[in-house]
Image (cartoon, coloured by chain):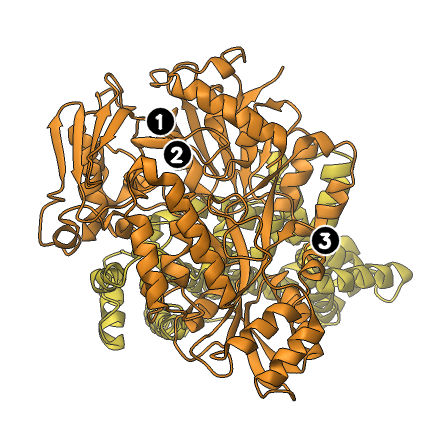
Amino acid sequence: MKLKNSLFAGVAACALLLGGTTAFADNHTGGSITVSYKDDVSTLDPAIGYDWQNWSMIKSLFDGLMDYAPGTTDLVPDLATSYSISDDGMTYTFKLKPGVKFHNGREMTAADVKYTLDRVVNPTTQSPGAGFFAAIVGFDAASAGEADGLSGVEAVDDLTVKISLSRPDATFLHVMALNFAHVVPKEVVEEHGADFGKHPVGTGAYKMTDWTLGQHVVFERNPDYHIQGLPKLDQITFEVGQEPIVALLRLERGEIDIAGDGIPPAKFLEVMGNPDLESNIVEGSQLHTGYITLNTQMAPFDNLKVRQAVNMAVNKDRIIRIINGRAVPANQPLPPLMPGYDKDYEGFKFDPDAAKALLSEAGLADGFTTELYVANTDPQPRIAQAIQQDLANIGIKAEIKSLAQANVIAAGGEKDQAPMIWSGGMAWIADFPDPSNFYGPILGCGGAVPGGWNWSWYCNAEIDKRAIAADAMADPSQAEARIEAWKKIFTDIQDEAAWVPIFNEQRFTIRSSRLDGPEGIFVDPVHIPVHYDHVHISE
Amino acid sequence: MYAYLFRRVLQAALILLGVSFITFTLLYLVPADPARQIAGRSATAQTVENIRVQLGLNLPFYEQYWRYLTSLLQGDFGRSYLQKSEVGELIAARLPASLLLMVSAIFTELVFGVLIGVVAAIKRDSWLDKVLMVLSFIGVSAPQFVVGILLLYVFAVQLQWFPIGGYGTFAHLVLPSLTLGVLGAGWYSRMMRSSLIDVLTQDYIRTAKAKGMPSVRVIFRHALPNALLPIIAMIGIDIGFFMSGIVVVESVFGWPGIGQLAWQAIQRIDIPIIMGVTLVSACAIVLGNLVADLVAPFVDPRIKLK
C-alpha cells in the first residue's frame, strides 16, 4: 500500500477507536451507485458465503463482534464495545453495543451471538468456516451434531457474551471478525431455512431490498445503522451477468461505478496507459502469494538441494512481465502486507549456474524429468511455460499438465500425484490478516493429508510445535514476540524450500470518477474488493 | 393421431431418461469432489465427510442416481452446490429471458430468411441471387461472438443507439436478436430458396402459370405454402436449440438466460445446475421436434401421422 494510504488508514483507525467517524463526517451522504459482476451472486448467508464476490457484500449486510479499520488490517471492535481476555488467554468476554437493531427492527442481544456461533458449527449448516471455531469449548461435540450448541459460549446477560476456549488461540479475535461469525437473527433464519442466503437480515450498514435472480441485487441504506454517519450511500445496485470487458466500456461511459471483476487482463496495458483513466484506478496490495509447490515426499524433490536448485532457477521478473506487471516478486511464503513478513530476508536469488551446481551435488547433473500441474485458464498455462523454460535451462524437463482447476486441486491433495504445482488461480489468499492463517492448511502437518491444501506435503514436527506455541501467545503484551516467532517460522520453512514463492499479486480497482472516499477502501485488504460502507459520491 | 401422440410422448420420456442417465454418469465421473468443493479450502476432514453424508455422495452410484430420479419426478431438481438455491427456481427465473430472446430471434430469422430466400429463388441465377447467397453463406459461417461483438461495438459503443448489454427494455433486445437472427437467417434463406425452386418446377405450378395466373399470385398462393414445410421443421429444431441456451450471445450481451446460467455452472462444476439445465434443454428439443411434427399435417394435408 502506498504511503498516503497507510497514513490515512492510521487516521481512520484512530477515528474509529474513538468511537466516532469524524474523519468521514464531512463527506455528504446519499446517492446510488452501480457495481457490476460477471457471475451471479451466490448466497449472502454469512455462515456459508465464501467467495471474493459475496465476501464484502455480506460484510455490508452483517456485522461481527470485531472488524478492521477501513483500508487496513487493524482489528477494532464492531458490535462489541469492548472485550477482555482472561490472564490465561482462555476466556474472552465481549460487551455488546446496546441498541443495535437488525433490519427487521428487533434489537440484537447476546443470545443472537450465541445462536450465530452454535449455528455455524452445527453440521446441518454445512458452513465452510466451521473449522475456524475449533478452539471454542464444546466444538467437537457440537460439530459432530452430538450437542445442541457450543457449551463454551454463554450469553451472560443481554449485552455480555463469554466465550471459553479449550486452548489459547491468539487468532481468536480475527476469527470473531470473520464473516462466519457475523450475527444473524434466529427467527429470520428459521423462517427461511436453507434460503436465508437469499433473504439476508443482519445489523449491517445496508439492507437487501431486492434480488432478481440472474439480474441484480439491491442494497439500501440502513437508517438505524449503529455507526453514525454510515453508510454514505442511499443505494447500491449489483448487476450480474456482464463480461468484464463490457463492464469496462460501461464504466468509461459512466453507466456503472465499480467494475467488480476488475480490469480484464487483455485490456490491462491499454487501460493503464490511458491518461483519462489514470485517476480512476486504485492500486493496493492483498494478502496473496503465488507459488510453486514442490512435493517433498516425491523423489527427487525429497532432496533439499533439488528444491533449492529449482528456487534459484525460476526467473520471477519474467513471470511478472507475463502478467503485465500486476505483481511484485516474492521470496518467502508471507505477503508483504502480512504481519510477520521479513523484509530483510533474502531468500534464494535467481542464479541458474548455482542451481546447476546444486543439481550436480545432488547427483542429478544430467537433470531429470518431472511434471508441472497448472490450472488451464489464462494466464496460468503461459506462466507454466515460462517456468518450464527456466527449468529446462538447468536440465530439468518438466511436462506441463494443464487441467481444470478442480482437478489440479484434487491432484495436489494426493500424496504421490503432483510433483510440482503452479498455484496460479488457486493460490492462498488469507482469510484474516494473521500469519497463522498462512501456515496450518498450506504448510503445516494438518494440511498434509489426503484432500488437503498442503500440496508440498511438507510436514515438519518441530515447526508444527513452534507454530502451536506461537498461537498460544494470546496475551496482547506478547503480540510482538508472537509475530517475531511467526516471522522466523516462515523464513525457516523457506530455507527448506518447500515452495518456490513467485509473486504477490497487486489489486487494481477501477471506479467511476464520481466515486470518492479514501483510496484504501477501494482495495481494502479485508472487505474485498471494496469496503462499500465508506464509498460515497463526490458531486 | 392419439396413438401417434402417445407413442411420441413415450419416446420422449425414454430419450429424457437416457439423457439424464448419461449426464448423471458423466458428472459422476468428473474427478472434482463436490463435498470438498462445498466445504471450501478451510474445512476439516470431518466437515467434508459430514457434507458428503448429508448429500448422499457416499452412496453407491446407482443409489445416487435413483435418489436424483425420484426427487426429479416430484419436480425437485435439487439445490445448487455453490449458489445454494433451488435449481428449479434458478432455471425458472431465467426462462422468461430465454423465451423472449428465442421468440424474437426466430422472428428475425424468419423475416430475413424467408424474404431473402424468396427473392433469391425468383431471381434465380441473377447477380442479386448470387449476392444474397454469398451473404447467407457468410451468415451461416460467421461465429456468433464475432458478429455479436461487432454489432455491440458499432451500434452500442460507437453510435450509442442501443445499451451495451443488459436486459429489461426493447432496446436491450435488438442487438442479441439481430446477432442470432441474421446468422440464423443464413440457414433459412438457403433452405427457402432451394425449397421454393423445387416447388416452382412442379407440374401444378406450370399449370397455374399456363392458365394465365399472375406470377405473384402463383408464388404466394400456390408455391410458398408448399415450400414452407422444411422451414417449419427447422423452427422446431431452433426452439430446442435456443432453449438449450445461447451461451455465447448471452455472455456477450449479458442476457440473463439459461445459457448464461449453464456456462457459469460448467465453469464452477456446479453439478445440480448442469443436470437441471441439460434436462430442461433436452425437454425443449424433444418438445420442439414434436410440435413441428404435429404442425406439419396442418400445413400439408398430404402428411399423415401414424
Q: Which mark is residue A59?
A: 2
Rendered residue at 50%/62% (across/down): A494
Distance CA(mark 1)–CA(mark 3):
45 Å
Q: A352 left or right of B275?
A: right
Relative to A297, does residue B44 appear above or below in the rendering?
A: above
Secondary structure category for the residue under label 3: helix
Secondary structure category for the residue under label 2: helix
Of marks 3 and 2, the one in the foreground? 2
Q: Nearer the viewer, residue B283 or B45?
A: B45
Rendered residue at 52%/58% (across/down): B239
At label 2, counting other C-alpha atoms closer than 10 Å, the crowd grade (few under 14, some 14-19, many 20 or more) is many
| Chain to which mark 1 belongs | A
- Residue A286 location (% of width, % of height): 53, 44
Rendered residue at 72%/56% (across/down): A321
Give the residue pinned by disc 3: B147
- Residue A275 location (% of width, % of height): 79, 34
Quarter placement of the C terminus of chain B: bottom left
Q: Which mark is residue A204?
A: 1
State if disc 1 and disc 2 touch (CB < 8 Å).
yes
Instruction: Look at label 1 and name its amino acid.
Output: Gly
Distance CA(mark 2)–CA(mark 1):
7 Å
Instruction: Look at label 2 and name its amino acid.
Output: Lys
Instruction: Look at label 3 and name its amino acid.
Output: Val
Chain coloured yellow in this rendering: B
Rendered residue at 31%/42% (across/down): A175
